[in-house]
């Protein structure tokens, strides 16, 4: 039994391409459709109601491509919109990145203290703390919003003095010398993995960095098998890119996240309906 329809993936911008990269490596037979809502990023500073409206619009567009599954490759959208979208799209499977990220964090920690860095909205909603404590009640969770990291990632500033200075300003207070500190840092925003090298340089090797990309890819694979949705074997899978603003910039910066060259001509410019129209 197979299902040759594509998997739909969306994010507020280009950070979700780290999840797309992991999915492509884990699921080489699957066709993928990616939507980056670059006209309205970042989602992390928006209200929960606004993010849910944006997520609904993104999914409505993906559904026009007859997708067999939706992956919310955005921690902010996963934290506030996963439940409503999963209910609205039944029986279509919908997977977010928070639960897989929490699972990976719990598996990595040795001292039972996990730090989570994310957007303001994700931290404010407490999604990671709930997800981690649901899996391991005794784990201590420390959360910190790092909104500037999104801008640095979207600009492609993945290293250098400015990036390291921002990392030091945000993160060093979480890891004071001589105190009991987290041994695991969950990168609770899909934009943050491209900063992992600079973060490791600042924090050293005593802190394990965790991102949800590979764990999410495994969750997608399991759900495909569970529902009999896996693609039949094919020689070459297809990846389709869509963005709501500046395809040229999406291709240039997105290549850093995706780990492969993205040609500007391969990025389709799309328009999403206004929030009011989507909710009417």
Image: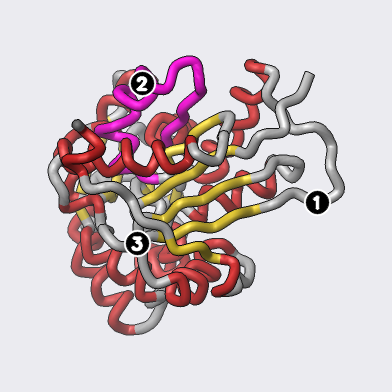
Q: Which residue is mark 1?
A: 236
- Is the Cβ of the residue at disc 3 closer than 8 Å to that at disc 1? no
Residue 61: name its quadrant.
top left
Q: Is residue 44 above or below residue 89?
A: below
Q: Nearer the viewer, residue 175 or 164?
A: 164
Residue 50: name its quadrant.
top left
Which is in the foreground here, disc 1 or disc 2? 2
Relative image position of residue 212 (x, y in whole percent): 47, 42
Residue 222 visible (yes or no): yes
Q: Secondary structure at mark 2?
A: helix
Q: What segment carries the magenta color?
A: 74-96
Residue 135: name its quadrant.
top left
Q: Residue at x 70, y 40 (%)?
A: 30
Q: Residue at x 34, y 61 (%)?
A: 38
What is the distance, in whole Å, between disc 3 and disc 2 at their CAs? 24 Å
Among the two numbered marks 3 and 2 on one chain, the one whose residue lies closer to the N terminus: 3
Residue 185 visible (yes or no): no
Query: Magenta span has 55?
Result: no
Within 10 Å of the Cα at label 3, are there few (<14), some (14-19), or many (20+) other Cα atoms? many
Q: Which residue is mark 2?
A: 88
Q: Secondary structure at mark 1?
A: loop
Within 10 Å of the Cα at label 1, are there few (<14), some (14-19), or many (20+) other Cα atoms? few
> Predominant secondary structure in magenta?
helix
Q: Which residue is mark 3?
A: 38
Relative image position of residue 62 (x, y in whole percent): 47, 41
């Amino acid at each position: 039994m197979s299902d040759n329809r594509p998997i739909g993936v969306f994010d507020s911008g280009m950070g979700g391409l780290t999840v797309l990269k992991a999915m492509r490596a884990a699921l080489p037979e699957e066709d993928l459709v990616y939507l980056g809502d670059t006209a309205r990023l970042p989602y992390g500073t928006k209200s929960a109601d606004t993010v849910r409206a944006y997520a609904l619009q993104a999914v409505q567009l993906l559904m026009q491509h007859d997708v067999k599954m939706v992956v919310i490759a955005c921690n902010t959208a996963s934290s506030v919109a996963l439940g409503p979208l999963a209910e609205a799209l039944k029986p279509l499977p919908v997977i977010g990145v928070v639960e897989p990220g929490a699972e990976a964090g719990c598996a990595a920690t040795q001292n039972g203290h996990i730090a989570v860095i994310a957007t303001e909205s994700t931290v404010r909603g407490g999604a990671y703390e709930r997800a981690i404590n649901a899996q391991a009640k005794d784990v201590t969770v420390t959360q910190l919003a790092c909104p500037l990291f999104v801008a640095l990632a979207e600009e492609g500033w993945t290293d250098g003095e400015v990036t390291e200075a921002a990392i030091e300003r945000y993160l060093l207070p979480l890891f004071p010398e001589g105190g009991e500190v987290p041994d695991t840092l969950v990168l609770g925003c899909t934009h943050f993995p491209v900063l992992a090298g600079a973060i490791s340089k600042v924090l050293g090797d005593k802190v394990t960095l965790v991102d949800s990309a590979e764990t999410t890819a495994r969750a997608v694979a399991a759900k495909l098998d569970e529902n009999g949705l896996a693609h039949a074997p094919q020689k070459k899978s297809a990846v389709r890119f869509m963005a709501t603003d500046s395809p040229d910039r999406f291709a240039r910066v997105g290549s850093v996240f995706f780990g492969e060259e993205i040609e500007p001509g391969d990025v389709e410019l799309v328009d999403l309906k206004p929030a009011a129209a989507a909710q009417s």
